[in-house]
Image: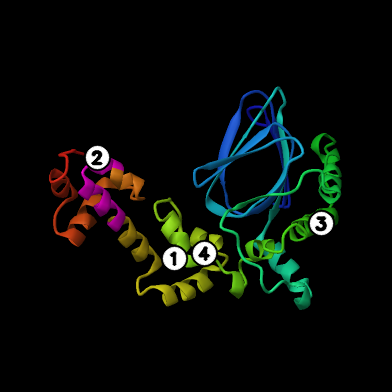
Amino acid sequence: MADGINTLRYSDIFFAMYFDGGMSCTHRNHSHVLLYIYSGEMLIEEKGKTTRLHRGDCAFIRKDFSVKMTKQAWNGEQFKAIFLTFTPNFLRGFYNKLEPDSIPKDARRENVSLCKLPSNRPDIVSLFESMTPYFDSGIQPSEELLQLKMVEGMYVLLNTNKNLYASVFDFTDPWKIDILNFLENNYMNDISIEEIANYTGRSLSTFKRDFKKCSTLSPREWLIHRRLEAAHELIQKGERKVSEICFDVGFKNLSHFSKIYKEKYGTPPTRNLQHGMGVEF
């Protein structure tokens, strides 16, 4: 327990959290997660839309760098929830055991990362209520039990919507996430090549191989090129400071940004800005 927050983690797949008061914590989703809210409130922000989850709500959140989750007490109740985190190893093992005929060939990956499951479904209630003894008892569930709960959670998902096959098993060829589409939506974020590979459902070596099919640039070169393009467009408008633009498009160092900007466009960013509204650094 730290700062009033209780967390339980088992085998990196079973995660419970609860805390009181008006505390909140925010993080981005690095793995596919199935969550269930016992009390309190969770806010999920994606592409300008906020979804609120409360007692009895269950949702699947696809791994996505653009999704932000906030957990907080609500209506006098502490925040209390359980998260099932589907690791790549678990997903590959589960997928390999599926009968080929059971996998829908026409499943399509949804455009949104959040799927709220129907409330009060017996299989959902049964799954998550069976986990409540582990909140306060101090008893650690066995590895065998954890695996059973993960499998149960996976079938909860797959029995909800066949399109979730494409979201969950995004490492298979028909459902691999489009690399350039992902980068276009996330180039301004502080994200490593390893993270990009993971988010797009690939190993690092597979990502590098697939990226060569998309661009003659390396992934790092593509990111720099795209950030410079975005910066140039904003600077030409002349409405904002160069320093703000530099950091907003994803660069971390202003002097380095100015140097490579001049190399690409022939003039320093401040000179281009002078043709706009004259805004300085």
Please state which of the two labelled residues, at mark 4 or mark 3, is closer to the viewer: 3
| Residue 197: mark in rendering | 4
Q: Secondary structure at mark 2?
A: loop
Q: Residues within 10 Å of mark 2 (few under 14, many from 20)?
A: some
In three-dimensional space, the C-alpha distance between marks 1 and 3, rounded to whole angstroms, equals 34 Å
Q: Residues within 10 Å of mark 3 (few under 14, many from 20)?
A: some
- Image: 96 above or below 42: below
Going by the numbered disc 3, the residue's amino acid type is Glu
Q: Please state which of residues 3 and 156 is positioned toward the viewer in this rendering.
A: 156
Residue annotated with mark 1: 180
Residue annotated with mark 2: 241
Residue at left 86%, top 48%? 122
Q: Which of the two discs, 1 and 4, labels the residue nearer the N terminus?
A: 1
Question: Left or right: where does residue 215 sit relative to residue 232?
Answer: right
In three-dimensional space, the C-alpha distance between marks 2 and 4, rounded to whole angstroms, equals 33 Å
- Image: 51 above or below 227: above
Question: Left or right: where does residue 27 sit relative to residue 188?
Answer: right
Q: Are marks 2 and 4 in contact (CB under 8 Å)?
A: no
| Rendering coords of residue 228 (x, y %) | 28, 56
Going by the numbered disc 1, the residue's amino acid type is Leu
| Rendering coords of residue 191 (x, y %) | 45, 54
The magenta span reads 229-244
Q: Are marks 1 and 3 in contact (CB under 8 Å)?
A: no
